[in-house]
Image (cartoon, helix red, strand yellow):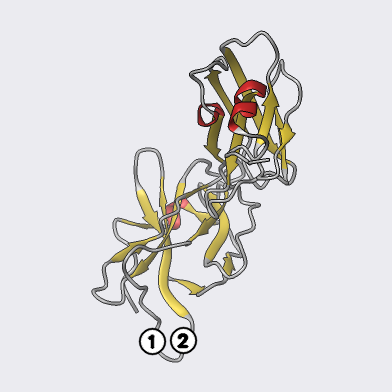
Amino acid sequence: MASTALGLHTPDEVKRRVMFALELVDPVTGRLAFEDMIVTAPGFAPPVRSASGRFVWIDVDPPAQRTVMVKAASKRRIFAPLEKAFEVPARDAGVTAADLVWRFPLEPTGLYAPPAGMLAAAGMLIAAAADRTPLAAVAVTLQFRDASDASVLASNYVARTDERGQFVAVAPALGGGGPMMLPPPDAAAGLVGWLAFTNSLPETRYTPLLPLRKGRLLRLPNPLAWGDLLNGAPPAPP
């Protein structure tokens, strides 16, 4: 039997049987996240999980356009809870299998574990050393000096601090440039890089240079205080 994008049945069978399918995406890896997830749609029966990692709800008769709310939660809390409402079209001759697939990215929390061999930095952001209030929803990016012209390279992935102020910033890719290496004796794997934090104003502040290493996760031992971060420009090369 031929498979479809839903990984269940032929296109005709999908169109006749499936109400909708949900794809939850890990934004770091680009892969579907499903093993750690609890997914529900209040008012409807629980979904089945396809072999491809999609959550699929089987339709009921008669066919009708329906408003659904899906809720997704990570058992290990490595992703923030997700709630989305949307209109599902009635299955009829004009609806294709692709019309029934909904795709949403998840938001990693500070408990997220990046894939082995990926450059990353994890830590916590607080208001001040004397006021340890966690700062949530602050954008976090790994940045580096470009080896060719000392301009700034930024990771293509932007993390966010969670409700505890914790974050995991990851650098899956840096675009077209290459990061500057630290001078000897630290040049073996050390990179000239730091973290950039941007709040809702928006205002951006920077850490000093960090001991970043290719393909490794740096866990910062102490919280970072917003008031202690560099304001105005990222750190200069060593």
Say whether residue 129 is visible: no
Residue 74: image quadrant is top right
Image coordinates for residue 116, horizontal then vertical, percent = 62, 67
Q: Residues within 10 Å of mark 1 (few under 14, many from 20)?
A: few
Amino acid type at mark 2? Asp
Say whether residue 105 is visible: yes
Image coordinates for residue 214, horizontal then vertical, percent = 50, 75
Indicate whether 43 appears above or below 2. above
Nearer the observer, 171 or 220: 171
Image coordinates for residue 76, horizontal then vertical, percent = 73, 46
Nearer the observer, 130 or 236: 236
Residues at discs 2 and 1 in contact (Cβ within 8 Å): yes
For this orientation, the residue located farthest to the bottom is 185
Q: Residue at x 59, y 31 (%)?
A: 11
For this orientation, the residue located farthest to the front is 1
Q: Quadrant of the N terminus?
A: top right
Nearer the observer, 140 or 34: 34
Q: Residue at x 67, y 23 (%)?
A: 17
Amino acid type at mark 1? Pro
* Residue annotated with mark 2: 186
* Residue annotated with mark 1: 183
Residue 21: image quadrant is top right
Indicate whether 148 appears above or below 125. below
Q: Residue at x 54, y 49 (%)?
A: 126
- Compute the Cα span from label 2 to label 1: 6 Å
- Helix, strand or loop at label 1? It is loop
